[in-house]
C-alpha cells in the first residue's frame, strides 16, 4: 500500500514543481485551500450522481493503477497481468472526463467531455502498441518481469520509438500539456468549466495521480526497473519515476497546446504506424 | 476461508450485475443507462477474476469501458433530441419484448435443470487462459491472428480514409479555412 501513498505524494510534488516552473511553488497548495473553502456551485438540472462518479473515479482509477506498479521488487499487488490492469485503469479516465463533462449540464463541459472521447482511440491505440512492444520483448505482462528482463540493456535504448510513443500517448491519456483540449481554454475550461470547490480539487488531483502512475510505469517498461549501481532498487525506481514525471511537467510549460485536428492527424498517421513498425522490429528480433 | 470469501464475492457481484442490468431499463437517461450497463459488465469481469481467469477478467474491464464510452459517442450522435440530453424511456414494444424475454428466460432456466451436466474430471489447468484459448481456437490460432491484424488494419484504414477531409477542411486551401 505504501507504493500507492508514494505515488500520491509524487502527484502533489508534480503539481508543486509545475508551480515552481511558473515561479510560484506554493500555488497548488494555495489553490487547494481556496477550492476547499469556496462555495459549491451547482448548475441547473445537473446530473449530480454522474458528475460525482466522474470526479471521484479519476483519482480512484489512478490509485488502483498504482497497486500494480513495482518499486524495485516491491509491489502492492503482484499480478501476472499488470500491464493490462494499468491500461484498464487509464481508460477509466475516458469515463471520468465524459461523466464530469456531461453531468454538469453545460455546453462547454459537454464539448470538453466529447473531445476526450473523440480523440481517445487515436491515443489509446499507439499507447497499447507501446505497452505490448515492451511486454512482447519480455515475454510477460507482469511489470516486475518486464523490468527484470532488461538487465544490461534498457528497452528505452533498443526500442526508442515505443518509448517516445509511450510518453506522448501517456500525456494524451492524462489530457496533459499539448493534449489538454478536454479542459482547453478555447471552451472555457471544458470539463473543468462548471466544476467548483472540492469537486474541482479532486478531479485535478486525479489527473496528477494519473500522470504520476504513468511515469512510474514507464520505469519497469522502458527504463530497466530498479536496476542501477550503488543505491537500492526501490530508490532507483523512485528516482527514475521522478525524472520522467519532471519531464512531463516541464513539457507542459514548453510545448503549446496542439490544434486538435493536427494532433489527431499526427496520432493516426505518425504515432500508430510508427508504433506498429517498432513492434514489428521487436517481434522479429525476439522471436 | 478463501472459499467462503469467494462464494460471497460471487453472489454479491452476480446480484450487482443483475441489478445494474435491470437499472438499464429503469432509468430515464441515456447516460445513466450506458453506465449502468457498464457497471453490469464490470461485475462480470470481476466474476472472471474470481475463477482465476485474470487476463480475461482484466481484459473485459478494459474493453468494456472503451466499448461503452465509444457507444456513448454514437448513441448521442444518432439521438433524435439534441445531444440526447432529454429524459427518455428505454422501453419500446413492451408487450413483445416482455414475451420474448420471458420466453428466453424460461428456455434458459429449463436448460439449467434438464441438461445432464458432466461430472468434473481432472483438475483445473495451470494457466486457464491458455487452456481456454486452445479450446476455442486450437489449430486455427494462426488464422485467428491473421484475421485480428486484418481487422485492425481495416479499422485504421477506415478512420484515416473517412477523416481525409476533416471538420477544418485543411487539405483544400492550405489551412486557411479554420480562421
Image (cartoon, helix red, strand yellow):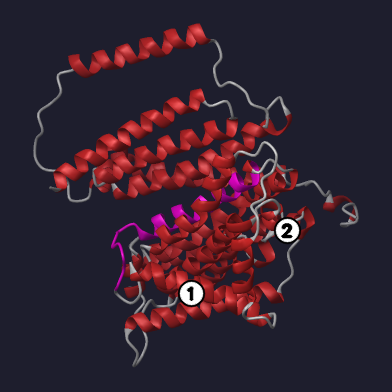
Q: Which residue is mark 1?
A: A10
The residue drawn where x is 69% and y is 66% is A178
Task: Tell me where the magenta segment starts and ends, as one range.
Answer: A74-102
From the viewer's perspective, tell me whether residue B128 is left or right of residue A61. left
Q: Is residue A157 visible?
A: no
From the viewer's perspective, tell me whether residue A33 is left or right of residue B116. right
Figure quadrant of residue B42:
top left
The residue drawn where x is 61% and y is 48% is A100
B60 or B32: nearer the viewer: B32
A146 or A183: nearer the viewer: A183
Q: Assign a secondary structure to mark 1.
A: helix
Q: Quadrant of the N terminus of chain A?
A: bottom left
> In terms of sequence position, does the residue under pointer 2 or pointer 1 come before the other?
1
The subunit carrying tag 1 is A
Q: Which residue is mark 2?
A: A184
x and y percentages locating residue A206 in the rendered image: 53, 60
Relative to B124, does residue A240 appear above or below in the rendering?
below
Q: Residue furthest bottom?
A: A230
Relative to B80, does residue B4 appear above or below in the rendering?
below
Relative to B65, does residue A281 appear above or below in the rendering?
below
x and y percentages locating residue B14 in the rendered image: 31, 33
A163 or A233: nearer the viewer: A233
B10 or A141: nearer the viewer: B10
Q: Quadrant of the C terminus of chain A?
A: bottom left
Q: Is residue A31 magenta?
A: no
Cα separation, mark 2 vs mark 1, equals 25 Å
Amino acid at each position: 500500500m505504501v507504493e500507492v501513498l508514494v505515488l500520491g505524494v509524487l502527484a502533489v510534488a508534480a503539481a508543486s514543481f509545475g508551480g515552481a516552473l511558473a515561479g510560484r511553488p506554493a500555488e497548488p497548495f494555495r489553490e487547494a485551500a481556496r477550492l476547499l473553502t469556496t462555495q459549491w456551485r451547482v448548475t441547473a438540472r445537473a446530473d449530480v450522481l454522474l458528475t460525482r462518479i466522474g470526479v471521484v473515479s479519476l483519482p480512484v482509477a489512478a490509485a488502483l493503477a498504482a497497486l500494480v506498479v513495482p518499486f524495485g521488487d516491491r509491489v502492492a499487488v503482484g499480478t501476472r497481468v499488470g500491464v493490462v490492469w494499468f491500461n484498464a485503469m487509464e481508460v477509466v479516465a475516458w469515463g471520468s472526463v465524459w461523466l464530469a463533462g456531461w453531468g454538469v449540464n453545460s455546453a462547454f463541459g459537454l464539448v470538453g467531455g466529447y473531445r476526450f472521447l473523440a480523440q481517445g482511440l487515436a491515443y489509446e491505440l499507439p499507447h497499447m502498441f507501446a505497452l505490448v512492444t515492451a511486454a512482447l520483448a519480455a515475454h510477460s505482462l507482469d511489470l516486475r518481469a518486464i523490468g527484470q528482463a532488461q538487465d544490461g540493456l534498457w528497452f528505452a535504448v533498443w526500442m526508442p520509438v515505443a518509448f517516445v510513443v509511450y510518453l506522448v500517448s501517456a500525456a494524451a491519456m492524462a489530457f496533459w500539456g499539448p493534449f489538454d483540449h478536454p479542459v482547453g481554454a478555447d471552451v472555457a475550461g471544458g470539463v473543468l468549466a462548471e466544476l467548483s470547490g472540492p469537486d474541482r480539487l479532486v478531479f485535478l488531483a486525479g489527473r496528477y495521480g494519473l500522470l504520476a502512475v504513468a511515469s512510474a510505469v514507464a520505469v519497469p517498461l522502458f527504463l530497466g526497473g530498479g536496476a542501477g549501481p550503488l543505491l537500492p532498487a526501490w530508490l532507483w525506481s523512485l528516482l527514475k519515476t521522478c525524472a520522467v514525471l519532471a519531464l512531463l511537467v516541464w513539457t507542459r510549460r514548453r510545448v503549446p497546446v496542439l490544434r486538435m485536428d493536427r494532433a489527431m492527424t499526427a496520432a493516426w498517421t505518425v504515432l500508430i504506424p510508427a508504433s506498429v513498425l517498432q513492434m514489428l522490429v521487436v517481434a522479429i528480433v525476439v522471436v | 476461508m478463501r472459499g467462503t470469501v469467494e462464494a460471497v464475492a460471487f453472489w454479491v457481484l452476480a446480484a450487482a450485475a443483475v441489478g445494474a442490468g435491470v437499472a438499464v431499463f429503469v432509468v430515464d437517461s441515456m447516460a445513466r443507462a450506458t453506465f449502468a450497463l457498464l457497471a453490469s459488465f464490470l461485475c462480470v469481469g470481476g466474476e472472471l477474476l474470481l475463477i482465476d481467469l485474470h487476463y480475461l477478467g482484466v481484459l473485459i474491464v478494459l474493453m468494456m469501458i472503451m466499448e461503452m464510452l465509444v457507444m456513448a459517442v454514437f448513441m448521442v450522435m444518432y439521438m433524435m433530441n439534441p445531444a440526447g440530453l432529454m429524459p427518455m424511456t428505454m422501453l419500446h414494444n413492451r408487450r413483445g419484448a416482455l414475451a420474448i424475454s420471458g420466453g428466453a428466460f424460461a428456455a434458459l432456466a429449463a436448460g439449467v435443470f434438464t441438461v445432464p451436466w458432466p461430472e468434473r474430471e481432472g483438475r483445473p489447468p495451470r494457466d486457464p487462459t491458455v487452456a481456454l484459448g486452445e479450446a476455442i481456437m486450437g489449430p486455427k490460432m494462426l488464422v485467428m491472428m491473421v484475421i485480428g491484424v486484418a481487422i485492425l488494419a481495416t479499422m485504421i484504414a477506415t478512420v484515416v480514409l473517412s477523416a481525409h477531409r476533416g471538420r477544418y477542411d485543411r487539405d483544400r486551401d492550405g489551412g486557411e479555412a479554420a480562421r
